[in-house]
Amino acid sequence: MTKKRSRSSAIRIIKRVSRSVKLRLSTGGTTERIISALHTVLSEQGDEDDDLKKCKTSMCHVGKMQKDVDSACSKDNLLFNFEEPLKDYVRAVQSIKATMLDRANAFRQHFDLDRERKYKELNLEKLKFMNPEKYAEAESEFREASLL
């Protein structure tokens, strides 16, 4: 046990990083200190290599994202090229729909007027047989209304 304690007191922790612990010999000669310093430098170089790899990977991801953005922009331009013709088409369809609605209303109005005219003709025919005196007067009113 004494050997473990003497060794543990000879090593001092100088820095604690999340992935590694950097140690330095606090006792010993110049050779041990040089080796300890070399070990510290080499252990930091590994971290730098990992960081450099992560940086390169991140740059690759940024490049891919840039390509995706460029692709999306070109698709947006393509969509913009189709947007105006689609808007024109929608306007044309709305215009046709409004025209059809106007024509349907005019047809309905014409149909109602025709039905009313036929109803009046029927009443006029009935009046002809029931009351011949009023028939002449009603017929002249009906003919005047038909001309308008």
Image (cartoon, rainbow, N blue to C red):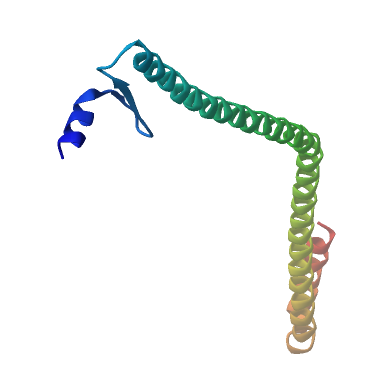
Q: Is residue 136 left or right of residue 6?
A: right
Total marks shown come to 0
Residue in the picture at 75% in, 77% down: 119
Q: Is residue 27 left or right of residue 21?
A: left
Considering only vertical position in the picture, is 94 above or below 1? Answer: below
Q: Quadrant of residue 49?
A: top right
Residue in the picture at 73% in, 59% down: 105
Q: Nearer the viewer, residue 41 or 75?
A: 41
Q: Is residue 41 left or right of residue 76?
A: left
Q: Position of residue 13 (x, y in %)?
A: 26, 25
Q: Position of residue 52 (x, y in %)?
A: 56, 25
Q: Quadrant of residue 55?
A: top right
Residue situated furthest left in the rendering: 2
Considering only vertical position in the picture, is 117 above or below 144? Answer: below
Q: Nearer the viewer, residue 138 or 1?
A: 1
Residue in the picture at 31% in, 13% down: 29
Q: Nearer the viewer, residue 61 or 112?
A: 61
Quadrant assignment for the C terminus: bottom right
Q: Position of residue 113 (x, y in %)?
A: 76, 66
Q: Position of residue 41 (x, y in %)?
A: 44, 18
